[in-house]
Image (spheres, rainbow, N blue to C red):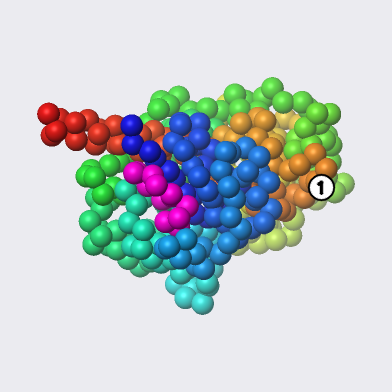
Amino acid sequence: MSKISCVDLFCGAGGLTHGFVLEDLPVVAGIDLDPACKFPYEANNNASFIERDVSKVTGEELSSLFGNASIKVLAGCAPCQPFSTYAQGYEQKENGKWSLLYEFARLAKDVQPDIITMENVPTVARHAVFHDFVKALEDLGYAVWHSVVDSSLYGVPQSRNRMVLLASKHGKIELIPPTHIKRKTVREAIGGLQSLTAGGVADDDCLHVSASLSEKNLLRIQASKPGGSWKDWPNHLVAKCHQSDKGKTYRSVYGRMEWDKPAPTMTTQCFGFGNGRFGHPEQNRAISLREAAILQSFPLDYAFVSDTSEVMFKVLGRMIGNAVPVDLGRAIARSINLHLAEVMQDTQKTLQ
């Protein structure tokens, strides 16, 4: 059996890595610049966290992480903010994060692993840097597949479309077909968790904690309907910015989720009631950090902080919202495992 090793660039809290681990695709290390990611990454995955700027990692250093593996898999999700629809303008050359996909390509060229996978926002395909990345891989002899993927078709209880790329030195590779015809709902994902009030925390899980609400926002969520908007409120609760013609288009802010539909896309601000449709379907509060993590398909017991650490909403919200959904990671891992099994089978036939 060939020895397989994976390295996860821009690994964050370990969403993609954990998907790989659950599918028995061994990850040896994750690399990320955010020190807050070290604890969750190492506490939940049998892999080392390397706090490093990927642009400073050399091909030699990356090769040493793979060791003597006969099959090398390089994975990564370069920070997506420059490619997001939230970005103000698409060609922001001064943004240093634009170069990170080029750094990914540089390391791919230096190491030339057997398999490469990348995940990002769908709008990355609008930019030259993505097409340069694809061409660089093709010029190196990789067969490249990429497509916008609906994560909810792979078990993620969330409406989250992502660009997924797979590339192989061993021939055609692509993502496995959808695994879930029936999409998981908010109720199925978080319906069994302990009830909370705004600002409350669960008895046995420090991550199941909800942000507090001002008196006005408490009145607003009490007036909110699942799937509705601030248009359901009495006039005295509507913010002035939403009364303008421009503000009237922002219907999903201050919204409640619906029990029997997938959640909206989790963002780095998903713990805040006013930041999107992040109100709990029936409790008068925003979703908790644990609920956000579960909606990103992290296991219920995934540890994000140590028992003695302070729970910081902005830090944890960033880690959770930026993560690759674990179940999408599992689908990517299954695709790689299936491809490698086919390659091995073809090799054995050739030798016979």
Residue at the image position 54 percent from the left and 50 percent from the top: 30
Residue at the image position 32 percent from the left and 48 percent from the top: 114
Q: Is residue 297 magenta?
A: no
**How far across and how far down the image is residue 346, in percent?**
18, 33
Residue 243 as seen in the image, left or right of residue 28: right
Q: Is residue 293 above or below residue 91?
A: above
Q: Quadrant of residue 209?
A: top right
State the SS at label 1: loop
Q: Is residue 67 magenta?
A: yes
Residue 203 as seen in the image, left or right of residue 137: right
**How far across and how far down the image is residue 311, in percent?**
79, 46
Looking at the rendered image, the quarter that the N terminus falls into is top left
Would you call the spot at circle 1 few (<14 residues within 10 Å), some (14-19), or many (20 or more)?
few
The foreground one among 283 and 312 is 312
Asked whether residue 267 appears in the rendered view, the answer is: no
Residue at the image position 52 percent from the left and 72 percent from the top: 96
Residue type at the position of mark 1:
Glu
Q: Which residues are magenta?
A: 62-74
The foreground one among 141 and 328 is 141
Residue 245 as seen in the image, left or right of residue 92: right
